[in-house]
Image (cartoon, rainbow, N blue to C red):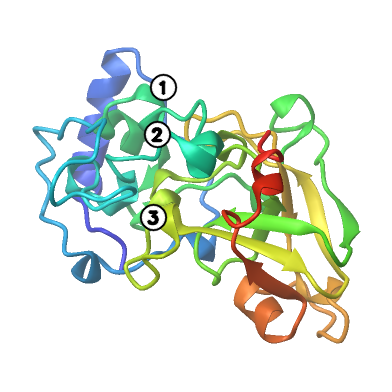
């Protein structure tokens, strides 16, 4: 269950205050991507945050704290971890990332949180960009075939249907900050990062990620839908990564075991 926040009336009051201060209005999109639903708050064991006194973001690990959390910003898993890797492979993937884009937690939530749905507002069109980043621009989406030997990755659990070429920067993926939370059910995958190799060819929708969550986007994203996967029903239903693994289209790999993967970081 997503983290519970104050109701819509309080949210509206916050937005009014921010608007008076010159803040931007909230996004109007409401598409929700299932892969960003992480473990429940009860599993994470995080304290109830104070919305009046946001916690300062830690810069170095200290006793009792872990890289990619917990703890989380203001104790809220949806706002992402306070301690991030700054060196090594994962540190390179997070190059240029500023938590919440430098906004205060309240300002960030006023822009990107749908209080009625208790979830983030995601860009429309499955998160694909449009020409010139204009709402009425041409949708930048086509289909392609992923071939055996290609290496892919994602920040998020295997319940999602989105992948990227291995090594692209986090800021180019159009993901919310909670996708960096290490899943308590898979602590070996720091920052909920997973890498894969294609074993059997399958089709995907492909295009640039739209700007989102104070990040520029622009990275290549692959969206797996049923009608493009050999032997699957001819529908537009999403196919989770877990199903691709079970059916032998992908295998999970260790991105830290091979030095050549580090050179792919863009």
Graded by Cα atoms within 10 Å as few (under 14), some (14 to 19) or many (20 or more), the crowding at tag 2 reads many
Q: Considering the image in quadrants, where does the C terminus appear?
A: top right
**Tag 3 secondary structure:** strand
Q: Position of residue 138 (x, y in %)?
A: 83, 36
Q: Are circles 1 and 2 on residues that touch, CB within 8 Å? A: yes
Residue 2 visible, this orientation: yes
Q: Which residue is mark 1?
A: 24
Q: Nearer the viewer, residue 117 or 162?
A: 162
Q: Residue at x 66, y 85 (%)?
A: 246
- The vertical placement of 244 against 120, above or below, is below
Q: Position of residue 11 (x, y in %)?
A: 25, 40
Q: Nearer the viewer, residue 40 or 10?
A: 40
**Tag 2 secondary structure:** helix
Q: Quadrant of residue 104?
A: top left
Q: Quadrant of residue 101?
A: top left
The number of numbered badges drawn on the structure is 3
- Whole-angstrom CA distance, mark 1 to mark 2, is 7 Å
Q: Which residue is mark 3?
A: 119
Q: Residue at x 30, y 45 (%)?
A: 81
Q: Which residue is mark 2?
A: 111
Q: Position of residue 77 (x, y in %)?
A: 28, 53
Q: Earlier in the sequence, mark 2 or mark 3?
A: 2
- The vertical placement of 22 against 221, above or below, is above
- The vertical placement of 123 against 132, above or below, is below
Q: Is residue 262 left or right of residue 93?
A: right
Q: Considering the image in quadrants, where does the N terminus appear?
A: bottom left
Q: Nearer the viewer, residue 115 or 77?
A: 77
Q: Position of residue 30 (x, y in %)?
A: 51, 51
Q: Which mark is residue 36?
A: none
**Tag 1 secondary structure:** loop
Graded by Cα atoms within 10 Å as few (under 14), some (14 to 19) or many (20 or more), the crowding at tag 1 reads some
Q: Earlier in the sequence, mark 3 or mark 1?
A: 1
């Amino acid at each position: 269950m997503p983290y519970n926040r104050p109701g819509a009336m309080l949210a509206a009051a916050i937005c009014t205050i921010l608007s008076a201060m010159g803040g931007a209005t909230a996004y109007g999109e409401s598409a929700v991507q299932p892969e960003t639903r992480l473990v429940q708050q009860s599993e994470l064991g995080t304290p109830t945050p104070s919305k009046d006194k946001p916690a300062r973001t830690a810069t170095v690990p200290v006793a009792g704290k872990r890289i990619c959390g917990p703890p989380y910003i203001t104790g809220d898993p949806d706002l992402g971890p306070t301690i991030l890797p700054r060196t090594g492979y994962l540190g390179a993937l997070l190059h240029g990332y500023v938590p919440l884009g430098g906004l205060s937690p309240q300002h960030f939530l006023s822009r990107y949180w749908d209080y009625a749905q208790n979830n983030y507002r995601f860009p429309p069109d499955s998160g694909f960009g449009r020409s010139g980043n204009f709402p009425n621009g041409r949708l930048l989406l086509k289909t392609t075939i992923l071939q055996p030997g290609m290496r892919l990755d994602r920040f998020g659990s295997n319940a999602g249907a989105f992948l990227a070429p291995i090594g692209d920067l986090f800021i180019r993926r159009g993901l919310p900050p909670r996708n960096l939370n290490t899943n308590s059910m898979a602590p070996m995958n720091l920052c909920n990062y997973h890498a894969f190799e294609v074993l059997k060819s399958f089709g995907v929708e492909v295009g640039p990620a739209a700007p989102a969550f104070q990040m520029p986007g622009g990275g290549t994203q692959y969206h797996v839908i049923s009608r493009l996967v050999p032997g699957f029903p001819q529908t537009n239903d999403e196919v989770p990564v877990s199903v691709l693994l079970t059916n032998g289209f992908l295998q999970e790999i260790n991105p830290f075991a091979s030095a050549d993967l580090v050179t792919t970081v863009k």
